Amino acid sequence: MNLLLLNENDFISPGQAAIDGRRAEHALSILKTAPGGTIRTGIIDGNIGTSTVTDITAGRITMEVSCHEPPPPPLPVTLICAMQRPKTFKKLLQCGAAMGVKKFIVIECWKVDKSYWDSPVLKPESLREQFLLGLEQGCDTVMPELETRRRFRPFAEDELPGITAGRLALVAHPNGEIRCPTGIDRETLLAVGPEGGFTDYEVGKFVETGFTPINLGPRIMRTEFALAALLGRIF
């Protein structure tokens, strides 16, 4: 936890907050927090600063909070990603949030097991948990948003043309025609497939709407590793 994130329910008075549970346990056992010490702190969807610990009682930490710095700027990217098996999906959400992705569009495609869509990982409380873990890691406060699309073809044919307009559009594919570009400073769409990748048909649909297939070289990576490599290289 590189940033302690607070929500409005944590505040017991203006400028004073109290936490317990996972966050307090981490602060006590890992950060070795003690009265008088400070913790790097952010307010969800707000500013970043520090908190000074005033009291620790029965695992509950009370702090004076001072947050005046803006959060880091978001990446100029919308991530279109295939639904993954739940454990991988959690890692992907955390990775994207930590690196500054603020919009996820999760889609169904041929290699996605339909049972994944029934996973509790898609429940709002679970999505929020994964995003919070990513924001804590990346020292950010702004919660991402997530949308889902269950039918690939209508999404590709009816929505993608409008989403793509005016943006650089890239689809990650092991047989992509060019190496992943670097140093992009414009609004970008990045499509990342499931484990096993998009089918040729799906890649073709992306290409029809202006996407360029890109690759990361000869090595095949796990989806969450590929995402980190792509975002780190593109931006």
Image: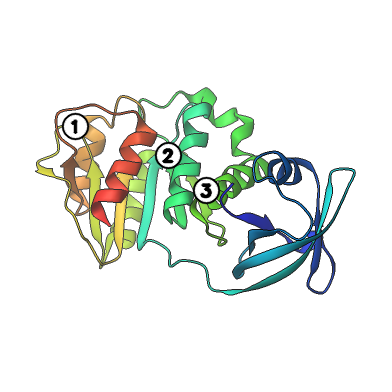
| CA neighbours of label 3 inside 10 A, class few (<14), some (14 to 19), many (20+) | some
Residue 151 bears which disc, if any? 2
Q: In this rendering, is residue 6 above or below 156?
A: below
Q: In this rendering, is residue 28 above or below 45?
A: above
- Between disc 2 and disc 3, whose residue precedes? 3
- Residue type at mark 3 is Gln
Depth check: give the residue in front, 63 or 86. 63
Q: What percent of the width, then of the height, locates residue 91? A: 48, 35
Q: Which residue is mark 3?
A: 137
Depth check: give the residue in front, 224 or 49. 49
Residue 174 bears which disc, if any? 1
Q: What percent of the width, then of the height, locates residue 102? A: 47, 58
- Disc nearest the viewer among 1 and 2: 1
User: Which SS class for mark 1?
Assistant: loop
Q: What percent of the width, then of the height, locates residue 124? A: 65, 45
User: Which SS class for mark 3?
Assistant: helix
- Residue type at mark 1 is Pro
